[in-house]
Image (cartoon, helix red, strand yellow):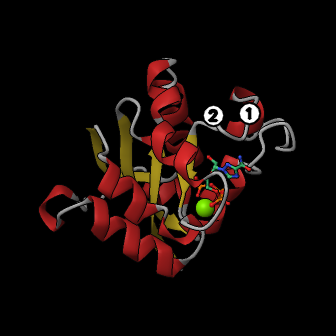
Amino acid sequence: MIQKSFVMMKPDAVARRLMGKILSRFEEKGLQIIGVKLMQIDEELAKTHYGEHADKPFFDDLVKYITSSPSLAMVIKGEDAISTIRKMVGATNPLEADLGTIRGDYAMDTGRNIIHASDSPESAEREISLFFDEDEICEYSIVDNVWIY
Ligand code: RTP
Ligand code: MG
């Protein structure tokens, strides 16, 4: 099924100048970038986005991390995009993430794991509408799709 996922390069990915490399992985896979926004996430948005973790001991550090510097918010579309992107992102702890995944290749610490991706269709829908207005998402057909699907 064609799906849309919310993906976000966290402040460390932006600050470490990894945006191009990470974006290329999604493009090279055959996924389509239909929304991109560099943004400074404020405390309220960070707390809403990660609301499911409000009771966890790492919540305050997580909010500090996500609001520390700009992030790159994205909407990415493709066949089974949500689970495909989660596989490409790798395990939450980068030391446990397989090499070849984004966290496995570029990160060392759970508290600096460089990227977020929606974990279910429900989270994707919630997160996309939390971060993007409808007119900030561009749906377009691409000529090379015939070579991908
Ligand atoms: P994300 O939501 O950012 O895509 O990450 P995830 O699904 O792989 O992991 P999740 O359990 O949802 O945790 C959200 C983020 O909180 C930070 N975290 N720190 N110190 C810790 O034990 C700990 N556990 C989680 C990470 O930045 C994680 O990505
Ligand atoms: Mg999560």
The residue tagged 1 is 109
Residue drawn where x is 53% and y is 49% of the image: 60
Coordinates of residue 48 in the picture (x, y in percent): 38, 65
Q: CA distance from mark 1 to mark 2?
A: 5 Å
Quadrant of image for the N terminus: bottom right
Residue drawn where x is 58% and y is 36% of the image: 114
Q: Is residue 5 visible?
A: yes
Q: Is residue 142 visible?
A: no
Depicted 117 relative to depicted 26: above or below: below
Which sits in the foreground, 125 or 52?
A: 52
Q: Residue furthest left?
A: 135
Three-letter code, disc 1:
Asp
Q: Is residue 129 left or right of residue 18?
A: left
Check mark 2 vs ligand 1: CB closer than 8 Å? yes or no: yes
Q: Quadrant of ligand 2?
A: bottom right
- In this rendering, the count of numbered labels is 2
Which sits in the foreground, 69 or 72?
A: 69
Coordinates of residue 92 in the picture (x, y in percent): 73, 50
Q: Secondary structure at mark 2?
A: loop
Quadrant of image for the C terminus: bottom right
The residue tagged 2 is 112
Three-letter code, disc 2:
Arg
Check mark 1 vs ligand 1: CB closer than 8 Å? yes or no: no
